[in-house]
Image (tube, grey):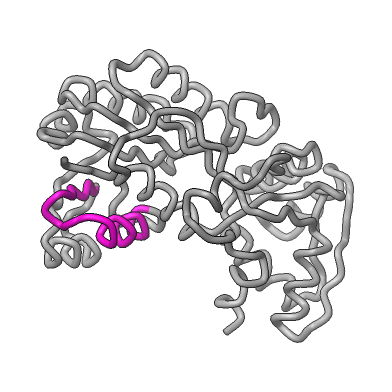
């Protein structure tokens, strides 16, 4: 059995590689990377993993790169606004190459999400996968706790955590948690298709985030909860570009609406065989 995974030199893909190497032999793995000359790609090659060039924006070359692959992890692209054609190209290539099982990193409860900006591209990709001629596992990953690393550092410096998320809760987990889950699904003796709603065990609020930052930094941090309009104005005054402002404010509105909270956690912990990483544990390395 040959397992391939895209984004092999990215944050999540590199962690998936390590988790897969702990579960199977290097000669059963194919690392797919846009830039095979990166040090991280060479490191995988040095460990006996075959590294193949794989660029979502070069659709004609994708099927040949998937030759001989039985199971494929499609890590969603990071080019917002371009992911649908990119993902379609990979799905089509997997079908032509005869891949039998594909796991895709989607978003938590993507089918019902309406506000979060990342939802539409995941929803369309899931529709494409529903029509694909192979078995599919939807790995609906919740928010990455690491997404708050810069926010945490800034809040520690200023003493203030600006938000318009209100009392909304976030069921986040770390990339390592999600990578371990993906590797578990990919390397299982029998591939199990289906939808996996993956999230942290304990949802947290902005008040919880401020408390964790205060504890880790040794500096008091207070939450400044504002309206969406006030949030946008404050970020504009701080000089953030319009696209970043839209993303931050819309994300906070999605949090306030409950779209980043999982009402039934536990699937992720079940896959990785341990409790998910806590908010404090995840943020601690950024204050070491």
Residue 20's x, y, as percent? 29, 55
Q: Which residues are magenta?
A: 13-33
**Is 14 part of what is drawn in magenta?**
yes
Foreground pick, 257 / 281: 281
In the displayed image of the protein, which residue is found farthest to the front?
189
Can you say whether 170 is above or below 262 in the image?
A: below
Residue appearing at x 28%, y 62% in the figure:
22
Indicate the position of residue 167 as horizontal and vertical percent values.
Answer: 86, 50
Disc count in the image? 0
Q: Quadrant of residue 234?
A: bottom right
Image position of 278 with respect to 246: above or below:
below
Residue at 62%, 71% in the rendered image = 283
- Where residue 69 appears, x then y in whole percent? 16, 36
Does residue 193 lie above or below 230 as drawn? above
Identify the residue at horizontal 83%, vertical 62% (top origin). 207
- Which quadrant holds residue 87? top left
């Amino acid at each position: 059995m040959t397992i391939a995974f895209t984004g092999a030199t990215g944050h999540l893909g590199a962690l998936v590689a390590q988790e897969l190497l702990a579960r199977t032999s290097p000669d059963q793995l194919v690392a797919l990377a846009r830039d095979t000359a990166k040090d991280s790609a060479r490191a995988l090659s040095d460990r006996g993993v075959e590294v193949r060039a794989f660029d979502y924006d070069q659709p004609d070359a994708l099927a040949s790169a998937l030759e001989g692959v039985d199971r494929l992890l499609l890590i969603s692209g990071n080019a917002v606004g371009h992911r649908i054609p990119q993902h379609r190209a990979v799905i089509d290539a997997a079908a032509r190459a005869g891949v039998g099982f594909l796991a895709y990193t989607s978003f938590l409860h993507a089918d019902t999400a309406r506000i979060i900006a990342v939802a539409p591209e995941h929803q369309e990709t899931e529709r494409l996968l529903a029509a694909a001629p192979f078995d599919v596992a939807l790995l609906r990953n919740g928010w990455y706790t690491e997404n708050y690393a810069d926010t945490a550092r800034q809040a520690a410096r200023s003493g203030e955590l600006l938000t318009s998320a209100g009392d909304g809760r976030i069921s986040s987990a770390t990339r390592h948690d999600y990578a371990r889950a993906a590797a578990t699904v990919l390397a299982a003796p029998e591939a199990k298709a289906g939808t996996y709603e993956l999230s942290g065990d304990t949802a947290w609020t902005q008040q919880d985030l401020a408390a964790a930052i205060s504890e880790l930094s040794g500096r008091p941090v207070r939450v400044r909860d504002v309206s969406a309009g006030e949030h946008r104005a404050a970020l504009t005054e701080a000089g953030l570009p319009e696209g970043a402002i839209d993303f931050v404010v819309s994300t906070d509105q999605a949090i306030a609406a409950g779209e980043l909270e999982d009402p039934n956690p536990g699937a992720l912990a079940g896959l990785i065989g341990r409790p998910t990483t806590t908010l404090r544990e995840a943020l601690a390395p950024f204050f070491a």
